[in-house]
Structures are given as structure tokens and as C-alpha cells.
Image (tube, rainbow, N blue to C red):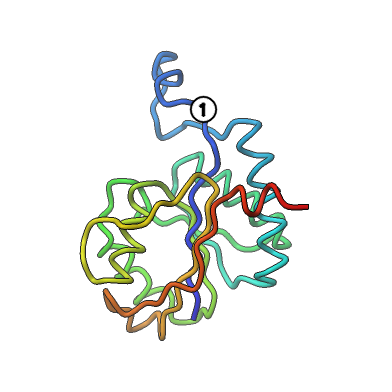
Amino acid sequence: MELYIIRHGIAVEREDFKKKGLEDHFRPLTLKGRKRMQKVAIRLRDFVEDIDVLISSPLVRARQTAEILSQIYFDLEIIEAAELVPQSPPQAFVKWLRVHGRSYKKIAIVGHEPHLSNLASYLLSGEEGSFIDLRKSGVLCLEIEDFATTEPGSSQLVFSVPPRMLADLR
């Protein structure tokens, strides 16, 4: 089984958004972020032809990234999961996988840093803390024997691709 971990695209700067009196939860992708994510998604589909389900953080920038991926993957279903918000511990999404991942073979998730790199590191090593650098619009893939019995430290890294390797090709 494969877990594709995707960081949201380039978003409006946090400080600029805050100056307008708006909450970070609502911070959207920039035009550049949308365009880059579209390129990444198109190129990703060249290598990963199908995904069963797309799980997104409920924050606007992650949801917008998931919507771009959904369009490129022919209206792939998007499910929001609070376990992908930035403050969530990696154990929370592991529990989500065990409960909800049973009927899928390929799951893509969209979220934030440092949560996603912490989650990937936890799934790979069983240790908390990150040893992975996941750029905005970056993608990595983990192989997991069975989502229903996911254990920390039991995953294998299949690939980690920075966005420039996907977006700047062609």
C-alpha cells in the first residue's frame, strides 16, 4: 500500500495575511502556488496513474491544493481530516489510517509542515521529530504493508521529490 504525502502549495505570506486581521486558517494559495501545484500534479499523474482517495487538512491552503490534485486526478474524492492540521501529533493520523484506511491501497494526504515531515519520519523510524525536508508542493511516497495495521517505524521510503523536479520538467 502506498501513502503519498504532499505539502500544500505556496500560500499568501503569514505576516501579510495577519496584518489584514485574518486568521491563518483561511490563508489561501497564491497564484504562483496554484500554477506550480498544477504542474506538480500533472507530472505526478505521469508517474502515479491512480490514487484511491485524497485526505486534506481542513485549512484553506491545504484544501485548495487538494482540489487541484482532485481535478488532475479526474475528480478524486477529497476527505477532510483534522488529524492533518499543523498541531496534530503524528500518532493521530496513524490512528486515522488504521480506522479509515482499510479499504484503500493508495492514499494521498495534503497538509502542512512540520507536521507532514514529522509524520513521515515517525512512520519510517518510529521516532518523533523530523529528518525529512518537505518543500511546498513537494511529494513523498511511503510503502506501508497494511494501513489497518500501520505501526510507527514499519514504512519504507519509495521516493521524495522536491517540487522543482516535477514542476520545472517539460
45 left or right of 129?
right
Q: Is residue 46 above or below residue 16?
A: below
* Residue 26 pos. (x, y %): 46, 32
* Residue 135 pos. (x, y %): 48, 47
| Amino acid under disc 1 | Val
39 or 83, nearer to the observer? 39
* Residue 3 pos. (x, y %): 48, 70
Residue at (41%, 47%) from the top-left corner? 112
State the residue lying farthest toward the left.
Answer: 127
Residue at (34%, 77%) from the top-left corner? 98
93 left or right of 54?
left
* Residue 82 pos. (x, y %): 36, 53
Q: Quadrant of residue 157?
A: bottom left
What residue is disc 1 on?
12
Q: Quadrant of residue 152?
A: bottom left
112 left or right of 92?
right
Please count the marks in the image.
Answer: 1
111 or 40, nearer to the observer? 40
Residue at (49%, 68%) from the top-left corner? 141
Q: Is residue 27 above or below residue 51?
A: above
Q: Under tag 1, what secondary structure? A: loop
Q: Residues within 10 Å of mark 1 (few under 14, many from 20)?
A: some
Q: Is residue 85 above or below residue 11?
A: below
State the residue lying farthest toward the right.
Answer: 170
